Amino acid sequence: MTDAMDEVLRILLVDDNPDDRALALREIRKVLPAAVVDEVGDGERLDALIASGADWDVAVTDYLLRWSTGLEVFDRLRRERPGLPVIMFTASGSEEIAVAALKQGLDDYITKTAKHYGRIPYAVRACAERRRRRREAEAASAALRQHKAMLQLAMEAAALEAWEHDLETGSTVLHGRSEQVFDGIRREMGLERLLGYLHPEDHDRVRAQFLAAAAGVARFDAEFRVLPQGRERWLRATAIVDAGEGRRRLVGVIEDITRRKRQEQQLREADRQKDQFIATLAHELRNPLAPIRYVAHLLQPGAPESSVVRAREVIERQSALMGRLLDDLLDVSRITLNRIELRRERLDLREVLGRAVEDIRPLADASGHALSLAQPAAALWVDGDEVRLHEIVDNLLHNAIKFTPRGGRLSLALGHEGGDAVLCVLDNGVGIVPDMLERVFEPFVQVSAGPGAASPGGLGIGLAVVKRLVALHGGEIEARSAGLGQGAEFVVRLPLSEAPAAAPSATGEVAAEASWRKPRVLVADDQPDAAESLALVLELQGHAVLTAFDGLQAQRVAERERPEVMVLDIGMPGLGGDELARWVRSQPWGAGVHLVAVTGWGRDEDRRRLREAGFDAHLVKPVDVDELLQAVERRRRS
């Protein structure tokens, strides 16, 4: 018994004889001078102490009391203060009473005689010590249970399974704590049977590591595949040698790492696709650059007109191809980041399809394909973005041309089912294997075009863009194919809308625009080649053109010449195109100037920012000449 315990002991002393209480208290003070003793000589005092919430380390009670008996006090304290040790000290009891009380849980029984008073403090101290030890054991047991519960929870959350292998008997036990590993069933089996679950390719490696760990050569730590019920799963097992309890064994944990391994595989596949994409991108971007550089030599002074015409056609065609590749990249980036905003309006899908077919027919003809279009007589109205819908059809048709050998057949059909417009693009090209029908819509996934295809290769972006654009319109797309060499069909479903109200005729406005004279244009770009080539194109169309090669020069020219149209690059030194546009709008003469932005920035937020700066049109480099001419001549009325 420690001195610290003596200092905190609190004792309940119940005896209706004050002289006997005094004798007992005297003996207690001799041995336990710091103890706090609550004396009780009647029932009211006992009731009050119990009601007050007082608690004690030990209770000492006489047997025969004026208001009760020691056994009744013992029963009451056992109910009111569970676990409180009780000692009976009496001269009125008997051997039968003592035996009965001890059987009921009484902690000690002392006969009240002169020579036994000295036993009281030692019996009190022994009871208090037993109670302390019992409480410590209960606390340790509770802590152990909590620790086991937390360990179990942690192992289940981490999909861990405890295991041990007896190095003498050769038996292995899986403890079955985690339902995610071996279904949470406790199992005992021999080593060879356990190794029999392993994937054949991992068996020898894991067995060698296991035997090395058993021999004490190395720590066991292995990742391997198992094939329970034909399902491949990845596990990681670690173990150390334990020589306790007179036997040697390996003890450790098994972790289910299937999910991590699949993610690693996905990352490796993504990395492979990234490398393939970068290599393909470099190849695809070099392709249009090469013929442009070649035909540039045809544009020497004195070159025949036929050479100039041919060079112009090649440059236009290849720059358009490069622009398309860059647009695809920008689209997939915007789509991945959810930065596409649809500019919805009520559209007749027949008109969208008609324009798309008209645009792509020269490419189909050059590839030797027969292209057909079937549409209903009545309009099919949808609520959509005309540019993005055109992009959907354009990508699908380009895809069909690319994967169809020369002389193939392509068809585009529009119809409706229920409340949906149904668009089908069908070809008799190389087809798609069944396991690629879903994957063709993933970014950068490429399907071999096969020998004889009109345009082999590609970035693997077009169909990913199509799927996202269709989804943004509330529709669905499905790829179908009977297999390699059987052609492919892409089916797009878009929700139909009601027909729009009739719009007023714009004939008068168109006629008025046609009568406008060619406006005077200021072209500003910090790349002289770009500025001068744009100026040359506009001059050939009858425009009077001024040029500037930075923002400040353009500001001076505009202040002096007051042009009606300004075609401005954005990233110019000194004064950016957006700053110049704000300056123009702040001038008394600037309200009627038509501002056209020509820039490499084509994100939605860039368009919004330049619109706020005062621009009327936004063209992304490389600029299509027809779009440039339309933007310039669609000037504001002053």
Image: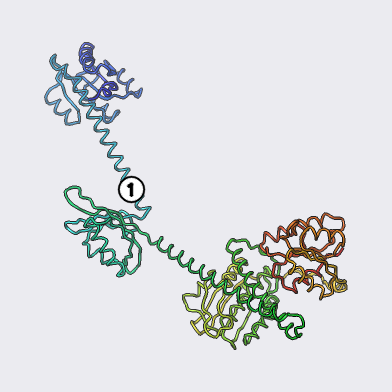
Q: Quadrant of the C terminus?
A: bottom right
- Looking at the image, is 504 positioned above or below residue 124? below
Please name whichever residue, 308 or 463, is drawn nearer the observer in this view of the structure. Answer: 308
- Looking at the image, is 617 positioned above or below residue 356? above
Please name whichever residue, 506 or 390, is drawn nearer the observer in this view of the structure. Answer: 390
Pointer 1: what residue? 151
Which residue reaches farthest front?
Answer: 301
Left or right of 330 on screen, residue 298: right
Residue at the location (45% across, 66% down)?
A: 268
State whether residue 77 appears in this view.
yes
Please name whichever residue, 577 or 497, is drawn nearer the observer in this view of the structure. Answer: 577
**Tag count:** 1
- Looking at the image, is 353 positioned above or below residue 469? below
Q: Quadrant of residue 30?
A: top left
Mark 1 lies on a secondary structure that is: helix
Left or right of 543 on screen, residue 398: left
Residue at the location (26% across, 28% down)?
A: 84
